[in-house]
Amino acid sequence: MEDNIIVRPATADDIHYAVTITDEMAESAKARGTGIARRSPEYITMKMEEGKAVIAITRDGTWVGFCYIEAWEHEKYVANSGLIVSPPFRKSGVATEIKRKVFELSRKKYPDAKIFGLTTGLAVMKINSDLGYEPVTYSELTTDEEFWKGCRSCVNFEILTSKERKNCMCTAMLFDPVEDAKKKAEIAKTVVTPEGDLEHHRKREFKGNFKLFERWVRFKQFVLLKGRKKKEGEEGKKSSFMSFLYFW
């Protein structure tokens, strides 16, 4: 990451970046064609004022990136949502630092909460894994209806509902503080090693399996999209047939 970039908790002094952030979120979702829950500048402003967001800016005040925190089910679950980086600063390592900072902020504010995320981005999945997240089924995420309402603005919402909220284009990942502590304790029993080595072990383990995981993610998305296109094709044929009957 560039030395002139500062990554820190956002405050009320940063609210003038809110429109820029939401505009870039919308443009990024449009470019990817995979969808993202839309957020208003007012919502982003609220997160900044509550101290539940992380922002990245250059030393001269240019906006670089952003991510915010949401809590669900009486703070039992926490999501680090809306990760976005300005195009000129992508592939610079700033996304990794933002994710690390918002993860630390989440752990500080909600130490007992399970932290989860939904993403279609393989790069984000790698970052999440390095932080201790693991791929899980949708059933292991929050059941809070308010969270799932946020998916309505996503272009893939129809897939989510057709799968009865059990699957979609996004991959679900979860950090469970209890399970993470157990895993570290088990590793510590077999090998006396510094905390840094534990993290290195986790990264190396995931790196060895990521190619297989990447193929699985792409296959899942292919199957889901194929199903949607098939349905759209059938609806198109039905519509054409009904038109034929009408004019006949």
Image (cartoon, grey):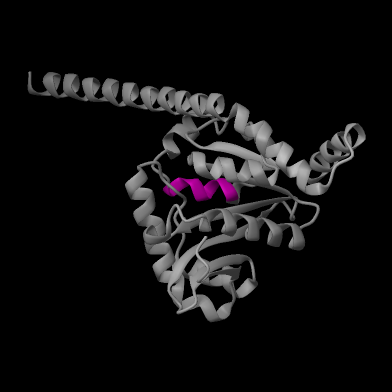
For the image, the number of numbered tags is 0
Q: Residue at x 74, y 57 (%)?
A: 107
* Front one among 103 and 117: 103
Q: Name the outermost residue toward the right.
A: 189
Q: Position of residue 188 (x, y in %)?
A: 88, 38
Q: Is residue 3 left or right of residue 241?
A: right
The answer to whether residue 94 is visible is yes
Is residue 99 part of the magenta span, yes or no?
A: no
Q: Residue at x 27, y 22 (%)?
A: 233
Q: Position of residue 92 (x, y in %)?
A: 47, 56
Q: Is residue 214 above or below residue 174?
A: above
Q: Position of residue 19 (x, y in %)?
A: 41, 70
Q: Position of residue 157 (x, y in %)?
A: 44, 39
* Front one among 228 and 85: 85
Quarter of the figure with residue 17: bottom left
Q: Name the outermost residue toward the left.
A: 248
Q: Is residue 3 left or right of residue 221?
A: right
Q: Is residue 138 above or below residue 243?
A: below
Q: Read off the magenta span.
A: 147-153
The rendered magenta stretch, by its main secondary structure, is classed as: helix
Quarter of the figure with residue 75: bottom right
Q: Residue at x 57, y 59 (%)?
A: 98
Q: Is residue 229 above or below residue 36?
A: above
The answer to whether residue 176 is visible is no
Is residue 152 part of the magenta span, yes or no?
A: yes
Q: Residue at x 69, y 62 (%)?
A: 105
Q: Quadrant of the C terminus?
A: top left
